[in-house]
Image: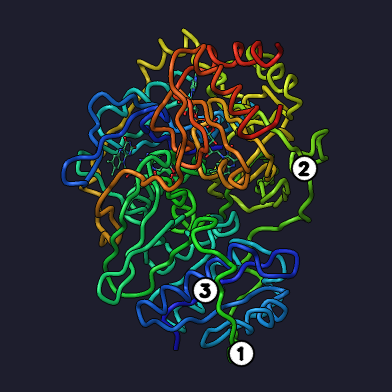
């Protein structure tokens, strides 16, 4: 079984974002970058499927600038067999259709049985990439996937619905699945994995050379979120904060 | 001919709350930009939903029935809605940003080669055109979206972007439309939806909730939060990563895939405030947020906020409340 995993590098959730003076993008310098959370689970699911089947080829595809090499090495160290890095330099494209069409060109040459992606990236949050690729490649698609079972020629997946409901569906292969977090326990890279990752293949291709469609969607301007509610900020030393909180509980919210 | 087409989702044989919000948004945007609004109902319950929708002030309600749409599949729904969009050619197609929308609308975007602006939170008007905004970068920033090219633009709205209570009533004409959909186009076999066995706590009726996020750091710290909850008689809840990591069972999770709560006190410890969490707790009467990051989006809906380290504050607060 050949499995393609889309792995994206994003700024960590605790990062402080500063917008460029013209509002076109964020200032990247000094930001911590890490692997997108649901992609970590997607990669783990691919590795577990390969292990269960006893054979297979797991390759990761990443789009982004040079800094993404770190994320690619991490995926290889965890056990991916090889990687394709689609290099893009700033200013970055923010049109999901264009991005998916570029991925599609790279993936179609490989002809995978499965494409696994994260449900949604924590930075741009379009939550579309995996489904767009599936449609473009004529694959079956499913999102919010929380369990997978390979059956001959088919895959059975459990999907999360709203408010605690779930549903299984059986799908023809090839399939593109957008993976929800929490469906497995992601591994950490082993020392041996880190060593062997250094020798694994990373093929590089250029985003600009593959970008052949009309870009129809873009970010015009970024700005900081406006605050709507009045918040009473509680400040001071730890003791003072604790004292003030107890007072709020007692005299304002009246719960004790 | 309508300029904005709102596509409905069926939830237990009535219109999904977030589809109602999308109708409300469409009416508002339509009025400001001079655009007419139509509604599309599809699937097994199309006639029921269409009857409900015809009480709203819109031009027209379309319904599509086809045996291959009786159960939801991304294959069937994306093909059918794409056909209706091509035939009607509206300027905009609106949806509520539900889980089902995530699942099939990107397919329509790829079929029509037209953009899908998802999870939109607001709009402004430029001349006679709406401009849409979405949150990005862990909900810390807002981005203005720009589209180009000819043809429909697909837009889904985040929960509560518009209020269903503001829907204008009226009467609408009804039209049934056909789609060409063969069983062979559906390569997926869905089974019956089911609910996972309910857990021990019903958070929805809890009066006081102490809720922990990834900021709790590690499993060994969970008992500290349990103690704090115990001294004030609160239930313990959490964000999704805490459940994903296996530190608490899933019935503790608050949010779009967990429980919806509205306690008198929601004390959030180390939770950033992603929309999927916020939809589950924003109805709380008093929201107290402790987070070390002053830019954490949850502060935006906090009544009381503390910028600080929960590992320092939590045990001391428990102590102070005990005495
Ligand atoms: C300022 C800026 C910075 C960018 N920085 C990066 C960067 O650091 N790294 C980068 O890879 N791209 C980067 N991009 C590229 C691009 O913008 C996004 O990949 C694209 O917009 C897709 O949107 P999304 O991530 O919200 O997709 P979603 O549809 O929300 O993502 C769903 C899933 O698709 C897969 N996926 C999406 N994008 C990628 C990707 N680029 N590489 C691998 N898998 C992906 C992942 O599995 C992800 O979980 C950047 C773009 C901009 C504007
Ligand atoms: C379709 C879908 C459904 C989802 N459903 C849900 C859902 O039902 N419920 C849910 O919660 N999420 C859900 N999510 C996930 C959601 O998007 C967020 O990823 C999640 O809510 C983040 O949880 P968090 O705030 O605990 O973690 P993070 O975003 O990582 O935030 C951790 C916070 O802790 C703070 N912190 C760290 N250390 C400390 C410290 N020592 N002291 C104080 N503060 C500290 C940090 O500053 C940060 O703000 C869903 C996502 C998707 C795409």
The chain identifier of the residue carrying mark 3 reads B
Q: Position of residue B114 (x, y in %)?
A: 37, 66
Q: CA distance from mark 2 to mark 1?
A: 41 Å
**10 Å crowding of disc 2: few (<14), some (14-19), many (20+):** few
On screen, residue B210 above or below A109:
above
Task: Judge the density around disc 3: few (<14), some (14-19), many (≥20) Cα neighbours within 10 Å.
Answer: many
Residue A172 on image: x %, y %: 63, 53
Quarter of the image holding residue A202?
Answer: top left
Q: Is mark 1 within 8 Å of ligand 2?
A: no
- Do discs 3 and 1 share a chain? yes
Q: Does residue A211 appear to the left or right of B275 in the view shown?
A: left
Q: Chain of mark 2?
A: B
Name the disc covering residue B6, or none: 3
Query: Can the viewer see residue A6?
Result: yes
First reached walking from the N terminus: tag 2 or tag 3? 3
Q: Name the mark nearer the viewer: 2 or 1.
A: 2
How far, Cα to Cα, is label 3 from label 1? 14 Å
Which residue: 74% across, 37% down? Answer: B207
Instruction: Using a 10 Å C-alpha cutoff, classify the residue at mark 1 as few (fewer than 14 neighbours), some (14 to 19) or many (20 or more).
Output: some
Query: Where residue B153 sits: x, y (%)?
Result: 38, 69
Q: Secondary structure at mark 3?
A: strand
**Residue corresponding to mark 1:** B174
What is the secondary structure assignment of the residue under circle 2? helix
Q: Is residue A184 above or below residue B98?
A: above
Q: Badges 2 and 3: C-beta atoms under 8 Å apart?
A: no
* Residue hosting label 2: B205
């Amino acid at each position: 079984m050949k499995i393609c995993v889309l792995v994206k590098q994003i700024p960590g959730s605790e990062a402080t974002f500063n917008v460029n003076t013209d509002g076109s993008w964020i200032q990247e310098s000094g930001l911590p970058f890490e692997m997108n959370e649901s992609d970590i689970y997607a990669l783990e699911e691919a590795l577990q499927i390969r292990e269960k089947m006893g054979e297979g080829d797991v390759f990761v595809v990443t789009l982004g600038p040079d800094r993404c090499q770190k994320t690619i090495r991490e995926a290889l160290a965890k056990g991916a067999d090889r990687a394709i890095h689609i290099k893009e330099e700033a200013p970055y494209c923010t049109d999901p259709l264009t991005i998916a069409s570029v991925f599609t060109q790279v993936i179609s040459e490989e002809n995978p049985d499965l494409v696994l992606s994260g449900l949604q990236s924590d930075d741009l949050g379009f939550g579309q990439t995996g489904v767009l690729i599936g449609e473009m490649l004529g694959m079956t698609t499913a999102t919010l996937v929380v369990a997978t079972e390979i059956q001959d020629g088919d895959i059975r997946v459990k999907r999360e619905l709203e408010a605690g409901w779930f549903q299984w569906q059986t799908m023809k292969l090839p399939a593109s699945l957008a993976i929800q977090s929490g469906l497995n326990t992601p591994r950490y890279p082993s020392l041996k994995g880190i060593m062997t990752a250094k020798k694994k293949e990373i093929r590089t291709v250029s985003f600009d050379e593959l970008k052949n469609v009309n870009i129809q969607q873009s970010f015009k301007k970024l700005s900081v979120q406006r605050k709507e509610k009045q918040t009473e900020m509680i400040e001071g030393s730890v003791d003072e904060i604790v004292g003030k909180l107890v007072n709020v509980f007692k005299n304002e919210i009246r719960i004790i | 001919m309508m300029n904005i087409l709102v596509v409905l989702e069926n939830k237990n044989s009535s219109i999904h709350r977030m589809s109602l919000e999308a109708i409300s948004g469409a009416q508002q945007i339509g009025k400001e930009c001079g655009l007419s609004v139509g509604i599309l109902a599809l699937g097994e319950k199309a006639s029921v939903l269409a009857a409900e929708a015809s009480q709203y002030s819109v031009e027209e309600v379309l319904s599509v029935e086809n045996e291959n749409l009786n159960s939801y599949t991304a294959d069937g729904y994306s093909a059918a809605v794409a056909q209706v969009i091509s035939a009607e050619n509206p300027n905009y197609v609106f949806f509520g940003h539900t889980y089902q929308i995530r699942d099939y609308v990107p397919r329509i975007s790829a079929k029509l080669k037209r953009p899908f602006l998802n999870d939109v939170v607001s709009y402004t008007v430029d001349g006679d055109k709406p401009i849409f905004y979405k949150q990005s970068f862990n909900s810390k920033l807002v981005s203005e979206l720009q589209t180009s090219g000819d043809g429909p633009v697909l837009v889904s709205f985040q929960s509560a972007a518009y209020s269903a209570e503001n829907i204008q009533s009226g009467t609408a004409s009804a039209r049934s439309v056909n789609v060409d959909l063969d069983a062979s186009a559906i390569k997926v076999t869905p089974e019956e939806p089911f609910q996972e066995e309910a857990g021990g706590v019903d958070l929805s009726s809890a009066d006081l909730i102490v809720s922990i996020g990834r900021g709790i750091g590690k499993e060994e710290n969970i008992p500290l939060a349990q103690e704090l909850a115990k001294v004030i008689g609160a239930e313990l809840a959490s964000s999704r990563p805490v459940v994903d990591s296996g530190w608490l069972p899933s019935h503790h999770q608050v949010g779009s895939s967990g429980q919806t709560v509205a306690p008198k006190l929601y004390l959030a410890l180390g939770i950033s405030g992603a929309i999927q969490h916020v939809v589950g707790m924003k109805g709380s009467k008093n929201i107290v947020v402790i987070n070390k990051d002053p830019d954490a989006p949850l502060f935006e809906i906090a009544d009381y906020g503390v910028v600080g380290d929960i590992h320092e504050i939590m045990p001391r607060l428990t102590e102070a409340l005990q005495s």
